[in-house]
Image (cartoon, rainbow, N blue to C red):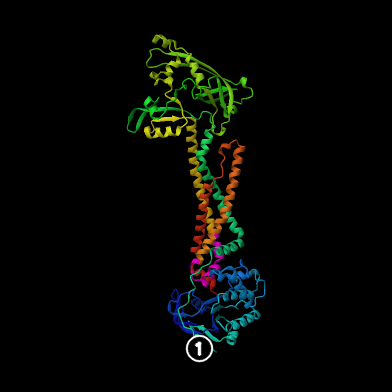
C-alpha cells in the first residue's frame, strides 16, 4: 500500500505538486491521467524513490519496480540477460537469476528466442521484456510510465490484458494518455491537474487495506559481484570495440615509448660498462693535482701538477708511471694515404707488450682507408725535435725523437663513439727514451744523464717534460674516484678514455632524457585526455545501465563497482597491448642496432620497466574512468528515466 500525506514538490521555485494526499490499495490497477507537463513523471519519481519529497510524508509498504515509457533495455545484453539484471545487481547467483528470468519471460508470454538482442524486437516485445524485468524481483508494486505510448492498438491491447491479469495480486500504477482504456480498465482512476491528484472513479471503495504501513523499504545492502560487473562491462565494450581499441592502442603506443625509456634508464650502468669493456686499455688512467697559484675574489689562477706521494697514498694509487705525452702527445696529427687527421695515442702498460707493435681501432682503419690484410705497409713514423730543459739546469738539450710503429691488429671499438686511436707499448717507448743521452745536461752534472733518468726522478716532477701527470693502472677506479671526491673535491683530476666516455655519454643521455620526458609527458597527457573522452562518451552511451542501477538498488557501491570494472577492463586491454608492443619494440630496436654495428646498445626485456609502465596504465585507467563517472549525476539519470510529463 502507498500513502501520500500533504506532499509538495518544486523544481527551482516552480511548484509541480501541491499538497497531495492519497492512499493506494494493496492490489488492483490504478490509472493516472494527465496532460503533458502536469507532473506525472515527477509523481512517479517520488513513488519509485528517484526523487525525494521536499514537503509532506510518503509511506510505502512493499517493493517497487518501475517500467518506463522507453523500455530501457540494454542492446549489448540478450533478452534474458536484461531480465536477469535486477537480480545480478542484488547479488543473486547467475544460475538462479537465469532460471527466474526465464520464468518471468514465460509469465508475460514472450515467445521469441531469449538469447536474441533487444535491438531486433518490436516495441511491444521490448515492453514485455521490460515488464518481465520488473517481475523478477517479486515486487509488490509495479509503476508503469506510458508503457503503450509508442505502440499500435493491437500491441497496446495485449499489454492492457497483461496488466489486468497482473493486477489481481499486485498493485499496478499506470500513467497514460489513453482515456478510453483508462475508463474501461481502471480499478481506481485519477487525473493530475492543477498540481493536484483528483479521484475520478473508484471500483474498490470498500476494499480493506490490512497491511501495516511502514516507512519505505530499502533493499538489503547487497551489491553486484565484481566479476559480474566485469562481464557486463566487457559485453558493452565489445559493442564499441573500434573506439575502445583505438583509445587503448594510442595509449599503449605512447606507453611503449615510456617502457623503452625506462629500460634504457635502468640499463645505462650495464650499458656503459659493456661499452667500456670493449676499450682495450680501459683500466689505465692519468692523474693530476690542481694547485691554486693565485686567487682574487672569485677568480683564481690554477696549475695542474703531478700529485705528491701523500695524495697518491691516500687514494691507494701505488702502481703509477711517468707520462710520455710530452714525447707522444695524446692527440697528434698524422698524414696517411694523403689523409690528415688527429689521432689519439694511448699507452698500454704491460710487461708482455714491449715491442713496436701497435693496435689501432676500426675508426682509425676506416679514417685512413687502410687494408689490414697488408700489414707490411702499415707503418707509422713519428719524427719530432724536442727540447729538454729544467729550472734546475743552466743548459738544455734538443733531442731527435724518431720512432717507427708497426700496426699489428685492429680492435672492434664502436665507431660511433670513437676517434681514430692507436694503442702503443709504454715499455717500448720508455726503453727507447732510456737510450737517449742528454749531452749538455750530462756535461753540466759531470755524469751521464739519459732521458729516462730525468723522467724517473721525482726531483723534476714539475718540469714540462714530465707533462704534469702520472699514469696508473687500477681495476677499482670507482673506489678511487669516490675517495678523490670526498677527500680532495675537485683538486684531484683523474681522467681516461673510459671516464671521458662515461661523462660524455651520461651528459648526452641526461639531455636526451629531459627532452624525451617532456615529449613523453605531453604525449601521455594527450593520450589520457583521449581515453578520458572515450570513456566519457562510453559512459554517456551506457547511462541507461547507471539509471537502471539507480532504480533497482539504492546501494551506491553498484555504480562504484561498475566504475572499477570499467577501469580494470581498460587496464587489462591497455596492459596486454602495451606488453606486446614493448616486446616487439624491444626486438625491433635490437635488430636495428645490430645491423648498424651497435650491438653493445642492445637492451634485454626489462620487467621492472614494464611493471612501472603497468602501474601508470592502472592509474590512467582509474583516472580516465573516475572523471567521467563524476559527471553522471542524478539529473542525467532522471532525464534518462523520465518520460514525457
Left or right for 409, reference 320? right
Viewer-nearest residue: 444 or 553: 553
The quadrant holding residue 98 is: bottom right
Q: Residue furthest bottom?
A: 206
Say whether residue 542 is magenta: yes
Q: Which percent across, then down, holds residue 366?
A: 60, 28
Q: Residues within 10 Å of mark 1 (few under 14, many from 20)?
A: few
Q: Residue furthest left?
A: 297
The residue that label 1 is drawn on is 208
Q: Which percent across, then down, holds residue 457?
A: 41, 18
Residue 460 makes an appearance in the image: yes
Range of magenta residues = 534-557
Q: Is residue 223 above or below residue 29?
A: above
Viewer-nearest residue: 84 or 470: 84
Q: Which percent across, then down, holds residue 16?
A: 47, 78
Residue 308 makes an appearance in the image: no
The quadrant holding residue 357 is: top right
Give the prevailing secondary structure in the magenta stretch: helix
- Residue at the image position 37 percent from the left and 33 percent from the top: 487
Q: Is residue 453 above or below residue 580?
A: above
- Residue at the image position 62 percent from the left and 19 percent from the top: 376
Say whether residue 462 is magenta: no
Mark 1 element type: loop
Q: Residue furthest right?
A: 112
Q: Is residue 569 above or below residue 89?
A: above
Q: How many numbered marks appear?
A: 1
Q: Which percent across, then down, holds residue 435?
A: 48, 13
Amino acid at each position: 500500500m502507498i500513502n501520500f500525506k500533504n506532499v509538495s514538490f518544486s523544481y527551482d521555485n516552480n511548484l509541480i505538486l501541491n499538497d497531495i494526499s492519497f492512499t493506494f490499495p494493496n492490489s488492483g490497477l490504478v490509472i493516472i491521467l494527465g496532460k503533458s507537463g502536469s507532473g506525472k513523471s515527477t509523481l512517479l519519481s517520488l513513488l519509485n524513490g528517484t526523487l525525494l519529497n521536499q514537503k509532506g510524508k510518503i509511506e510505502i509498504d512493499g517493493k517497487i519496480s518501475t517500467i518506463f515509457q522507453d523500455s530501457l533495455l540494454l542492446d549489448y545484453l540478450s533478452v534474458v540477460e536484461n531480465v536477469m539484471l535486477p537480480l545480478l545487481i542484488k547479488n543473486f547467483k547467475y544460475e538462479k537469476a537465469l532460471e527466474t528470468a526465464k520464468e518471468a519471460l514465460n509469465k508475460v508470454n514472450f515467445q521469441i528466442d531469449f538469447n536474441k538482442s533487444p535491438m531486433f524486437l518490436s516495441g511491444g516485445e521490448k515492453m514485455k521484456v521490460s515488464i518481465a524485468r520488473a517481475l523478477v524481483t517479486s515486487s509488490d508494486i509495479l509503476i508503469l510510465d506510458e508503457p503503450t505510448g509508442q505502440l499500435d492498438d493491437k500491441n497496446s491491447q495485449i499489454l492492457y490484458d497483461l496488466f489486468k491479469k497482473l493486477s489481481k495480486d499486485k498493485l499496478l500504477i499506470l500513467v497514460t494518455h489513453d482515456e478510453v482504456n483508462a475508463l474501461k480498465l481502471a480499478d481506481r482512476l485519477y487525473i493530475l491537474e492543477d498540481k493536484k491528484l483528483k479521484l475520478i472513479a473508484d471500483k474498490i471503495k470498500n476494499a480493506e487495506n490490512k497491511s501495516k504501513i511502514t516507512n519505505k523499504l530499502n533493499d538489503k545492502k547487497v551489491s553486484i559481484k565484481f566479476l559480474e560487473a566485469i562481464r557486463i562491462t566487457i559485453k558493452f565494450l565489445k559493442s564499441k570495440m573500434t573506439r575502445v581499441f583505438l583509445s587503448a592502442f594510442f595509449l599503449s603506443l605512447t606507453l611503449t615509448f615510456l617502457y623503452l625509456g625506462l629500460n634504457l634508464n635502468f640499463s645505462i650502468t650495464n650499458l656503459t660498462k659493456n661499452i667500456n669493456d670493449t676499450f682495450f686499455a680501459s683500466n689505465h688512467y692519468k692523474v693530476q693535482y690542481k694547485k691554486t697559484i693565485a686567487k682574487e675574489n672569485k677568480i683564481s689562477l690554477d696549475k695542474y701538477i703531478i700529485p705528491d706521494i701523500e695524495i697518491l697514498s691516500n687514494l691507494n694509487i701505488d702502481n703509477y708511471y711517468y707520462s710520455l705525452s710530452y714525447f707522444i702527445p695524446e692527440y697528434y696529427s698524422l698524414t696517411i694515404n694523403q689523409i690528415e687527421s688527429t689521432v689519439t695515442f694511448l699507452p698500454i702498460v704491460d710487461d708482455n707488450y714491449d715491442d713496436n707493435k701497435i693496435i689501432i681501432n676500426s675508426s682509425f682503419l676506416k679514417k685512413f682507408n687502410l687494408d689490414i690484410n697488408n700489414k707490411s705497409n702499415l707503418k707509422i713514423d713519428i719524427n719530432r725535435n724536442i727540447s729538454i730543459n729544467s729550472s734546475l739546469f743552466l743548459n738544455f738539450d734538443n733531442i731527435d725523437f724518431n720512432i717507427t710503429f708497426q700496426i699489428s691488429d685492429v680492435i672492434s671499438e664502436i665507431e660511433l663513439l670513437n676517434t681514430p686511436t692507436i694503442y702503443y707499448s709504454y715499455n717500448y717507448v720508455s726503453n727507447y727514451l732510456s737510450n737517449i743521452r742528454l749531452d749538455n745536461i750530462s756535461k753540466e752534472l759531470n755524469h751521464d744523464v739519459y732521458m729516462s733518468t730525468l723522467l724517473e726522478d721525482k726531483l723534476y716532477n714539475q718540469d714540462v717534460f714530465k707533462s704534469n701527470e702520472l699514469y696508473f693502472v687500477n681495476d677499482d677506479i670507482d673506489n678511487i674516484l669516490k675517495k678523490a671526491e670526498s677527500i680532495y673535491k675537485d683538486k684531484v683530476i683523474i681522467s681516461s678514455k673510459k671516464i671521458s666516455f662515461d661523462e660524455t655519454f651520461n651528459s648526452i643521455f641526461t639531455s636526451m632524457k629531459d627532452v624525451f620526458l617532456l615529449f613523453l609527458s605531453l604525449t601521455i597527457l594527450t593520450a589520457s585526455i583521449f581515453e578520458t573522452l572515450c570513456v566519457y562518451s562510453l559512459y554517456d552511451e551506457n547511462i541507461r545501465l547507471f539509471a537502471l542501477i539507480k532504480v533497482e538498488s539504492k546501494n551506491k557501491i553498484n555504480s562504484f563497482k561498475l566504475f572499477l570494472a570499467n577501469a580494470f577492463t581498460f587496464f587489462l586491454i591497455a596492459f596486454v597491448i602495451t606488453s606486446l608492443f614493448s616486446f616487439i619494440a624491444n626486438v625491433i630496436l635490437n635488430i636495428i642496432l645490430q645491423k648498424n654495428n651497435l650491438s653493445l646498445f642492445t637492451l634485454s626485456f626489462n620487467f621492472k620497466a614494464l611493471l612501472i609502465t603497468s602501474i601508470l596504465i592502472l592509474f590512467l585507467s582509474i583516472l580516465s574512468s573516475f572523471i567521467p563517472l563524476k559527471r553522471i549525476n542524478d539529473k542525467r539519470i532522471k532525464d534518462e528515466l523520465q518520460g514525457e510529463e
